[in-house]
Amino acid sequence: MIISDEQVTTEEVKSWKGLHLLHFGGSTCSQKVRALLREKGLDYTSHHVDLAKQEHVTPWYLGINPRGVVPVLVHDGVVHVESNDILAYLDALPSEVAAYFPQTPEERAIVDASLTLENDLHFALREITMGFIFPKRLAQKPDDVLAKYEKDGADDPSRAKEIAWWRAFAVAGITNDQARAAVKAHRDAFDVLEKRLETNEWLIGDRISVLELAWFITMNRLRMGGYPLEIHPKLFGLYNRLIERPAFALETKTPAIISKILLPAVRVGQILRGKRMKDVAGDILAA
Ligand SMILES: N[C@@H](CCC(=O)N[C@@H](CS)C(=O)NCC(=O)O)C(=O)O
């Protein structure tokens, strides 16, 4: 999806040449795009947008993407948003590497439906992240940040939805009901993928595709939250095959301060409060 010229008020990006990616290390949507850029050997200029420092709600950033989310691809001055659309756009650029989107209409329809589901799960994935991985205290957006988020940038209904989510999160965190629904939604999606793998080596066609890319990133995030991927043996096998590829493996690395200090500390708190995924949604994972 392209942000129209009049909605892009941060004029400088219109003169950027080549591929520019505005992204954040720990953002799953950014991870998918970086992994494809690597797999396809496409060069790009990287612009780090620190979500933890709320750099995505500044007038500068909202003047590029009024939705206030990453990633954004700027190609020769044109602003592209929505990670799955960006994947399709990048895949269609001239390249020596085989396409990641299938070329037949039948397979393309299956891929589009699966990517739509993956995109629809985005808030559920955030609920996994904020419910089981990051402490609310660090993740929530203060009122002044939300006010800025609301005020700047062109009108966009997606931004209103984002702000509503963050306001509810600031008040109630992730409730058990939300967390359970998020786990169930992912379990259902993974069950469908597992079925596909009963008769195929890959999720579509006879080689790696954009589906491996998109779902690998989701699986990785779920695992970080304590999801036992082994309950889907074929999918777990695929995950383990994919992690051998450097473009994928790089996206599983977290900075030591997070993996060695923050996450273990969060985990101890969860054990004490009975808030691990298996405490909150054990029945869903067992079924
Ligand atoms: N559907 C959008 C979702 C983009 C999105 O929500 N990105 C997240 C990171 S994965 C973000 O920027 N969140 C802003 C925040 O955490 O405040 C896409 O696929 O690009």
Image: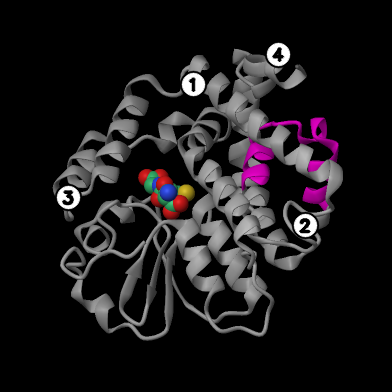
Q: Residue at x 60, y 67 (%)?
A: 36
Report the span colored magenta: 218-240
Q: Name the secondary structure under disc 3.
A: loop
Classify 10 Å Cα crowding around label 3: few (below 14), some (14-19), many (20 and above): few
Above-or-below relation of 59 to 235: below
Q: Earlier in the sequence, mark 2 or mark 1?
A: 1
Q: Earlier in the sequence, mark 1 or mark 3?
A: 3
Q: Name the secondary structure under disc 1.
A: helix
Q: Earlier in the sequence, mark 3 or mark 4?
A: 3
- 25 left or right of 49 in image: right
Residue beneath disc 3: 155
Residue beneath disc 2: 242
Q: Residue at x 54, y 63 (%)?
A: 33
Tell me, yes or no, whether the highlighted magenta stretch contains residue 221.
yes
Q: Name the secondary structure under disc 4.
A: helix
- The circle on residue 178 is 1
